Image (cartoon, rainbow, N blue to C red):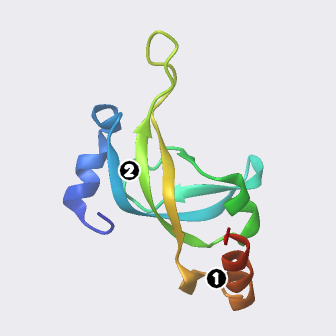
Amino acid sequence: MKGTTGNAEKMADIDKLVGRFSCHIELETCRDVSISRPRVRHSASFSPDTRVEFSRTLRDTFPVGTRFIATVNVCQKDVGKPHGPPYVKACDVAVIAASVSDPGLMAKSARRSDP
């Protein structure tokens, strides 16, 4: 989906996508001026104001600018009726190794994930 105008236009109307999964969505950690912790943004797959729910452990482990590939689920909070704007929730997350400048960090995180 990354980089294709047609798909980006389809994803722009996120209200119609609630409950659906999208695969191979590129995500990236970034800084938000109003929040001290790193946030995650998607790369042009949805409208720019769409929030991403993402693992805090991964956000804190890898440096800002790290890219990930994930499957995302379009969600919306529900308290009897839809509440707040739709957002995407990342699952099946994989790090794009080329985006991490420290190969030792990749090796360390791979060892930690072993059972």
* Residue occupying image coordinates x 74% and y 46%: 34
Give coordinates of residue 60: x percent, y percent: 76, 62
Q: Where residue 41 is drawn, which disc sits there? A: none
* Residue occupying image coordinates x 71% and y 88%: 102
Instruction: Please tell me in which quadrant of the rendered image residue 66 appears.
Output: bottom right
What amino acid is found at the position of numbered circle 1 in the picture?
Answer: Val
Instruction: Name the element at disc 2.
Output: loop
Give coordinates of residue 32: x percent, y percent: 68, 53
Q: Is residue 56 left or right of residue 5?
A: right
Gap between marks 2 and 1 measured at Cα: 24 Å
What amino acid is found at the position of numbered circle 2 in the picture?
Answer: Phe
Tell me the residue that label 2 is attached to. 46
Q: Is residue 113 above or below residue 103?
A: above
Give coordinates of residue 98: x percent, y percent: 55, 86
Give coordinates of residue 29: x percent, y percent: 62, 63
Picture quarter with the C terminus: bottom right
Density class for disc 1 (Cα within 10 Å; few <14, some 14-19, many ≥20) is some
Name the foreground residue: 84 vs 105: 105
Tell me the residue that label 1 is attached to. 100
Residue most extreme to the right: 36
Density class for disc 2 (Cα within 10 Å; few <14, some 14-19, many ≥20) is many
The disc, 2 or 1, on the residue closer to the chain's N-terminal end is 2
Total marks drawn? 2
Name the foreground residue: 109 vs 25: 109
